[in-house]
């Protein structure tokens, strides 16, 4: 996948909404990268979708990767 579109962004936001993160605390670049990544910088979560592999499998495990981070400084909805 070369870029994320509205469908993929919606799937990612569904995961962050379920966790209770405020949407303004989440950044989803339109570009993709390798196996994808989730990084936390202070109160800001950046989620980069994968260029390689199956997006649905990746997004299916995204919640676990996010919950493994220290989200104490991230704004909740």
Image: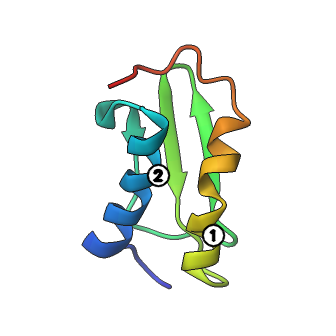
Residue 36: quarter of image: bottom right
Q: In this figure, which residue is indicated by the disc labeled 1?
A: 58
Question: Residue 75's spot in the image, x, y percent?
Answer: 40, 19
- Say few, some or many: other residues with alpha carbon within 10 Å of mark 2 (under 14 / 14 to 19 / 20 or more): some
Q: Is residue 55 left or right of residue 14?
A: right
Q: In the depicted view, which residue is nearer to us: 34 or 74? A: 74
Q: Helix, strand, or loop for circle 1?
A: helix
State how far apart marks 2 and 1 are (Cα): 11 Å
Q: In this figure, which residue is indicated by the disc labeled 2?
A: 15
- Residue farthest right in this picture: 68
Q: Helix, strand, or loop for circle 2?
A: helix
Q: In the depicted view, which residue is nearer to us: 65 or 5? A: 65
Asked if disc 2 and disc 1 are in contact, CB closer than 8 Å, the reply is: no
Taking the spot 30% from the left edge, 32% from the top edge, the residue there is 24
Taking the spot 48% from the left edge, 21% from the top edge, the residue there is 74
Taking the spot 56% from the left edge, 78% from the top edge, the residue there is 55
């Amino acid at each position: 996948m070369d870029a994320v579109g509205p469908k993929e962004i919606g799937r990612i936001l569904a995961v962050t909404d379920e966790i209770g993160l405020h949407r303004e605390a989440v950044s989803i670049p339109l570009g993709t990268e390798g196996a994808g990544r989730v990084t936390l910088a202070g109160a800001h979560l950046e989620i980069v979708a994968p260029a390689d592999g199956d997006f649905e499998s990746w997004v299916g495990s995204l919640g676990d990767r996010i919950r493994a981070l220290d989200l104490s400084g991230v704004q909740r909805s």
